[in-house]
Amino acid sequence: MSAMDDRQGNDKDINVASNPGHFERENYTNLFLNFGLLIFLLPIIFLIPNVRRFPGFFGITALSLGLGGFIFFSIAKFSLFSRGKFLSFGSGGMTQRNRMFYRLGYALIVSASMIAISILFVEKIHGSG
């Protein structure tokens, strides 16, 4: 490798480094991959004692939250379907209202999942008795 090739390689690094958005997205991805599971499991740790005391209530709550989340998510997605956009990821082509429904739907589904996982942990550890 010549000195010229080495210098050109450094220029490429400088061009990537001059794009802070690239590193910012990468950092968010790494943060999510490293701490996402921990952040997801922390509420479950606090839910487990309550789920153990009131399993029926939390079962109905998880089902209701999941159903509500699915409804909000579906409303947001159907707005895209009506415009002929059948394959989309994220809330990019949605109106502000539908974007809010989309995110609320996901939040409710994640909350329901946390409660459901807590119920599964309690059932696995303590049995159904």
Image (cartoon, rainbow, N blue to C red):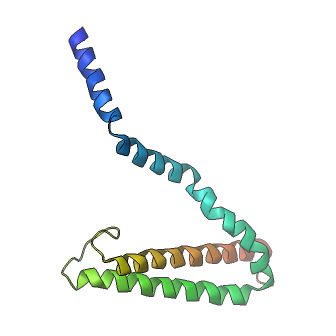
In the rendered image, residue 26, in percent from the top left (x then y), is placed at: 42, 45
- Residue 127 shows in the view: no
In the rendered image, residue 20, in percent from the top left (x then y), is placed at: 37, 41
Residue at image point 44% right, 74% down:
103
Residue at image point 40% right, 41% down:
23
* Number of on-image labels: 0
The answer to whether 29 is drawn above or below residue 2 in the figure is: below
Q: Is residue 17 left or right of residue 121?
A: left
The answer to whether 24 is drawn above or below residue 84 in the figure is: above
Closest to the observer, 72 or 49:
72
Residue at image point 18% right, 80% down:
84
Q: Is residue 103 left or right of residue 81?
A: right
Residue at image point 27% right, 24% down:
11
Q: Tell me the quadrant of the picture where the C terminus can be found.
A: bottom right
Closest to the observer, 109 or 21:
21
In the rendered image, residue 33, in percent from the top left (x then y), is placed at: 51, 51
Q: Residue furthest top?
A: 3
Residue 111 lies in quadrant: bottom right
In the rendered image, residue 91, in percent from the top left (x then y), is placed at: 34, 71
- Residue 14 shows in the view: yes
Q: Is residue 49 left or right of residue 62?
A: right
Q: Residue furthest left?
A: 84
Residue 38 lies in quadrant: bottom right
Q: Tell me the quadrant of the picture where the N terminus can be found.
A: top left
